[in-house]
Amino acid sequence: MDTGPQPADNAATRFVRKVNQRCQYLLDKSCPHTTGRWIALLLALAFYVARVWYLRGFYIVSYGLGIFNLNLLLGFITPQIDPELEGPELPTKADAEFRPFVRRLPEFKFWFASLKSILFGTALTFFSVFDVPVFWPILLLYWFVLFFVTMKRQIRHMIKHRYVPFSLGKKKYGKGPVAKDSK
Protein backbone atom coordinates (compact mmCIF):
# COMPACT_ATOMS: atom_id res chain seq x y z
CA MET A 1 0.00 0.00 0.00
CA ASP A 2 1.64 3.19 -1.19
CA THR A 3 1.17 6.18 1.08
CA GLY A 4 2.18 8.67 -1.56
CA PRO A 5 5.09 11.06 -1.56
CA GLN A 6 7.06 11.36 1.66
CA PRO A 7 7.22 14.74 3.37
CA ALA A 8 10.46 16.64 3.01
CA ASP A 9 13.13 16.08 5.66
CA ASN A 10 12.79 18.44 8.55
CA ALA A 11 15.64 20.67 9.69
CA ALA A 12 16.67 18.37 12.56
CA THR A 13 17.03 15.34 10.26
CA ARG A 14 19.10 17.34 7.77
CA PHE A 15 21.30 18.65 10.60
CA VAL A 16 21.90 15.15 12.02
CA ARG A 17 22.68 13.79 8.55
CA LYS A 18 25.13 16.65 7.92
CA VAL A 19 26.87 16.10 11.28
CA ASN A 20 27.13 12.34 10.60
CA GLN A 21 28.62 12.99 7.16
CA ARG A 22 31.14 15.45 8.64
CA CYS A 23 32.14 12.96 11.37
CA GLN A 24 32.54 10.19 8.81
CA TYR A 25 34.65 12.50 6.62
CA LEU A 26 36.94 13.29 9.56
CA LEU A 27 37.23 9.59 10.46
CA ASP A 28 38.12 8.75 6.86
CA LYS A 29 40.78 11.47 6.84
CA SER A 30 42.25 10.21 10.14
CA CYS A 31 42.67 6.64 8.93
CA PRO A 32 46.25 6.93 7.58
CA HIS A 33 47.44 8.98 10.58
CA THR A 34 47.95 6.11 13.02
CA THR A 35 50.32 7.90 15.38
CA GLY A 36 48.11 10.97 15.62
CA ARG A 37 45.03 8.87 16.31
CA TRP A 38 46.71 6.99 19.15
CA ILE A 39 48.08 10.22 20.61
CA ALA A 40 44.53 11.61 20.58
CA LEU A 41 43.34 8.46 22.38
CA LEU A 42 46.07 8.80 25.00
CA LEU A 43 45.18 12.47 25.52
CA ALA A 44 41.50 11.57 25.98
CA LEU A 45 42.50 8.83 28.43
CA ALA A 46 44.78 11.24 30.34
CA PHE A 47 41.92 13.75 30.57
CA TYR A 48 39.58 11.03 31.85
CA VAL A 49 42.09 9.82 34.45
CA ALA A 50 42.78 13.40 35.60
CA ARG A 51 39.05 14.07 35.89
CA VAL A 52 38.41 10.92 37.93
CA TRP A 53 41.44 11.68 40.09
CA TYR A 54 40.28 15.26 40.68
CA LEU A 55 36.69 14.22 41.49
CA ARG A 56 37.78 11.26 43.65
CA GLY A 57 34.87 9.22 42.38
CA PHE A 58 33.29 7.40 39.44
CA TYR A 59 35.26 4.24 40.17
CA ILE A 60 32.50 1.95 38.93
CA VAL A 61 32.48 3.84 35.62
CA SER A 62 36.26 3.41 35.43
CA TYR A 63 35.93 -0.30 36.17
CA GLY A 64 33.35 -0.73 33.41
CA LEU A 65 35.56 1.26 31.06
CA GLY A 66 38.52 -0.97 31.93
CA ILE A 67 36.54 -4.19 31.34
CA PHE A 68 35.23 -2.91 28.01
CA ASN A 69 38.70 -1.89 26.79
CA LEU A 70 40.17 -5.21 27.98
CA ASN A 71 37.57 -6.96 25.81
CA LEU A 72 38.56 -4.76 22.86
CA LEU A 73 42.24 -5.58 23.45
CA LEU A 74 41.45 -9.29 23.38
CA GLY A 75 39.67 -8.88 20.06
CA PHE A 76 42.65 -6.93 18.74
CA ILE A 77 45.26 -9.58 19.60
CA THR A 78 43.13 -12.60 18.68
CA PRO A 79 43.20 -14.06 15.16
CA GLN A 80 40.03 -13.87 13.13
CA ILE A 81 40.05 -17.61 12.62
CA ASP A 82 40.72 -19.42 15.89
CA PRO A 83 42.88 -22.51 15.23
CA GLU A 84 41.29 -24.37 18.15
CA LEU A 85 37.79 -23.94 16.78
CA GLU A 86 38.28 -23.90 13.01
CA GLY A 87 41.30 -26.15 12.63
CA PRO A 88 44.97 -25.21 12.26
CA GLU A 89 45.01 -22.29 9.83
CA LEU A 90 48.34 -20.89 10.97
CA PRO A 91 51.45 -22.62 9.60
CA THR A 92 53.00 -25.12 12.00
CA LYS A 93 55.79 -26.41 9.77
CA ALA A 94 58.46 -24.72 7.68
CA ASP A 95 56.94 -25.92 4.40
CA ALA A 96 53.37 -24.93 5.33
CA GLU A 97 51.65 -22.16 3.46
CA PHE A 98 52.06 -18.73 5.02
CA ARG A 99 48.83 -17.09 6.07
CA PRO A 100 49.14 -13.59 7.43
CA PHE A 101 47.74 -12.74 10.84
CA VAL A 102 44.28 -11.26 10.44
CA ARG A 103 42.86 -9.71 13.59
CA ARG A 104 39.37 -10.36 14.88
CA LEU A 105 39.13 -6.61 15.56
CA PRO A 106 41.07 -4.36 13.14
CA GLU A 107 43.29 -1.59 14.51
CA PHE A 108 41.06 1.29 13.36
CA LYS A 109 37.93 -0.24 14.88
CA PHE A 110 39.86 -0.95 18.09
CA TRP A 111 41.01 2.66 18.26
CA PHE A 112 37.59 4.09 17.43
CA ALA A 113 35.71 1.92 19.93
CA SER A 114 38.26 2.77 22.65
CA LEU A 115 37.98 6.48 21.90
CA LYS A 116 34.18 6.35 21.97
CA SER A 117 34.22 4.46 25.26
CA ILE A 118 36.59 6.94 26.89
CA LEU A 119 34.54 9.89 25.67
CA PHE A 120 31.37 8.20 26.91
CA GLY A 121 33.01 7.51 30.28
CA THR A 122 34.11 11.14 30.47
CA ALA A 123 30.55 12.26 29.74
CA LEU A 124 29.26 10.04 32.56
CA THR A 125 31.53 11.84 35.03
CA PHE A 126 29.41 14.96 34.60
CA PHE A 127 26.39 13.27 36.21
CA SER A 128 26.54 12.49 39.91
CA VAL A 129 24.02 9.65 39.59
CA PHE A 130 26.85 7.50 38.13
CA ASP A 131 29.14 8.15 41.09
CA VAL A 132 28.21 4.97 42.93
CA PRO A 133 30.11 4.64 46.22
CA VAL A 134 32.35 1.56 46.08
CA PHE A 135 35.56 0.46 47.73
CA TRP A 136 37.83 1.12 44.75
CA PRO A 137 40.88 -0.95 45.83
CA ILE A 138 38.81 -4.13 45.52
CA LEU A 139 37.69 -3.15 42.01
CA LEU A 140 41.26 -2.35 41.03
CA LEU A 141 42.56 -5.62 42.43
CA TYR A 142 39.81 -7.59 40.70
CA TRP A 143 40.53 -5.85 37.38
CA PHE A 144 44.26 -6.66 37.64
CA VAL A 145 43.50 -10.31 38.47
CA LEU A 146 41.13 -10.48 35.52
CA PHE A 147 43.71 -8.81 33.25
CA PHE A 148 46.57 -11.13 34.21
CA VAL A 149 44.50 -14.31 34.03
CA THR A 150 43.12 -13.31 30.62
CA MET A 151 46.51 -12.30 29.24
CA LYS A 152 48.14 -15.47 30.56
CA ARG A 153 45.55 -17.55 28.72
CA GLN A 154 45.95 -15.45 25.56
CA ILE A 155 49.75 -15.66 25.61
CA ARG A 156 49.55 -19.45 26.03
CA HIS A 157 47.25 -19.52 23.00
CA MET A 158 49.77 -17.44 21.01
CA ILE A 159 52.63 -19.74 21.96
CA LYS A 160 50.64 -22.89 21.26
CA HIS A 161 49.61 -21.76 17.76
CA ARG A 162 52.77 -19.78 17.01
CA TYR A 163 51.43 -16.40 16.09
CA VAL A 164 52.50 -12.90 17.03
CA PRO A 165 49.76 -10.29 16.80
CA PHE A 166 52.14 -7.34 16.67
CA SER A 167 54.46 -6.29 13.91
CA LEU A 168 56.43 -3.21 13.15
CA GLY A 169 54.94 -2.88 9.70
CA LYS A 170 56.12 -3.92 6.32
CA LYS A 171 59.72 -5.02 6.09
CA LYS A 172 61.83 -2.44 4.30
CA TYR A 173 64.65 -3.45 2.07
CA GLY A 174 67.33 -0.83 1.74
CA LYS A 175 70.44 -0.65 -0.28
CA GLY A 176 72.93 -2.89 1.38
CA PRO A 177 76.62 -3.10 0.60
CA VAL A 178 77.08 -3.10 -3.15
CA ALA A 179 79.40 -5.70 -4.55
CA LYS A 180 82.28 -4.24 -6.55
CA ASP A 181 82.96 -5.42 -10.04
CA SER A 182 85.82 -7.86 -10.09
CA LYS A 183 87.61 -7.90 -13.40
Image (tube, helix red, strand yellow):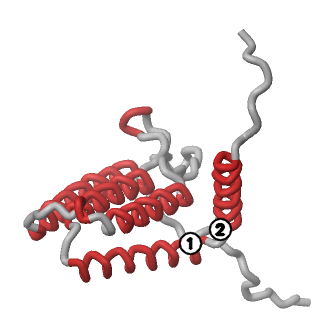
Is residue 82 left or right of 38 when viewed as pictured?
A: left
- Give percent across and percent down for residue 143: 19, 62
The residue tagged 1 is: 37
The residue tagged 2 is: 30
Compared to residue 74, the image places residue 174 above or below, namely below
At 42% from the left and 40% from the top, the residue drawn is 82
- Give percent across and percent down for residue 52: 27, 75
Is residue 16 left or right of 117 when viewed as pictured?
A: right
Q: Are marks 2 and 1 in contact (CB under 8 Å)?
A: yes
Residue 126 disc label: none
Q: Quadrant of residue 27?
A: bottom right
Q: Nearer the viewer, residue 162 or 102?
A: 102
- Residue pushed farthest top? 1
Q: Categorize mark 2 by other alpha carbons within 10 Å: few (<14), some (14-19), many (20+).
A: some
Q: Nearer the viewer, residue 161 or 136?
A: 136
Looking at the picture, which amino acid does disc 1 mark? Arg
